[in-house]
Amino acid sequence: MSTPEDQARENIDRLLTRSGWTVCNQSDANILAYRGVAIRDCTLKSGHGFADYLLYVDGRAAGVVEAKRARVALTGIETQSETQQKSIFDPQNLIEQGNLPPKSR
């Protein structure tokens, strides 16, 4: 039986796909293969955890989607999102990683 978090991710995958995003796992991500790529469960740089979805447009980091089950209050999520954003959009990280999440190069 799937958990509420699994159900939320299935719904997010479906919504992203319907919106034109190509959804993939980090292990087989190619951010240049499609115009919009959503990579699920990405490991971020050390100390920053992981992101439920990293969004790339034309090969460039464009955003983060944090998956939460239905009816979960979003209070406090802004701190988590800010930490993820700093990891992804940090200029030094973009230089070191070549604008790719770890393990996707």
Image (spheres, helix red, strand yellow):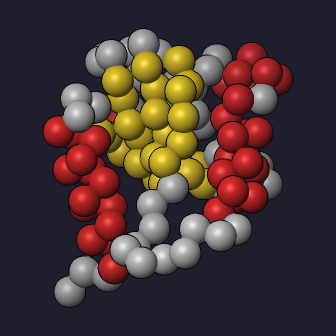
Q: Is residue 33 above or below residue 56?
A: above
Which residue is the extreme one toward the bottom?
1
Q: Is residue 69 left or right of residue 90?
A: left
Q: Is residue 66 above or below residue 37?
A: below
The quarter of the displayed image where residue 49 is located: bottom right
Q: Is residue 6 left or right of residue 83?
A: left
Q: Please count the marks in the image.
A: 0
Residue 51 or residue 78, whichever sits in front = 78
Q: Residue at x 73, y 48 (%)?
A: 82
Q: Is residue 35 above or below residue 41?
A: above
Q: Residue at x 29, y 18 (%)?
A: 34
Q: Position of residue 21 (x, y in %)?
A: 28, 31
Q: Quadrant of the N terminus?
A: bottom left
Q: Position of residue 29 (x, y in %)?
A: 38, 32
Q: Residue at x 23, y 34 (%)?
A: 19
Q: Is residue 77 visible?
A: yes
Q: Position of residue 51 (x, y in %)?
A: 56, 51
Residue 70 or residue 5, whichever sits in front = 70
Q: Residue at x 69, y 40 (%)?
A: 85
Q: Is residue 3 left or right of residue 86?
A: left
The quarter of the displayed image where residue 2 is located: bottom left
Q: Is residue 103 visible?
A: no
Residue 66 or residue 105, whichever sits in front = 66
Q: Position of residue 96 (x, y in %)?
A: 75, 22
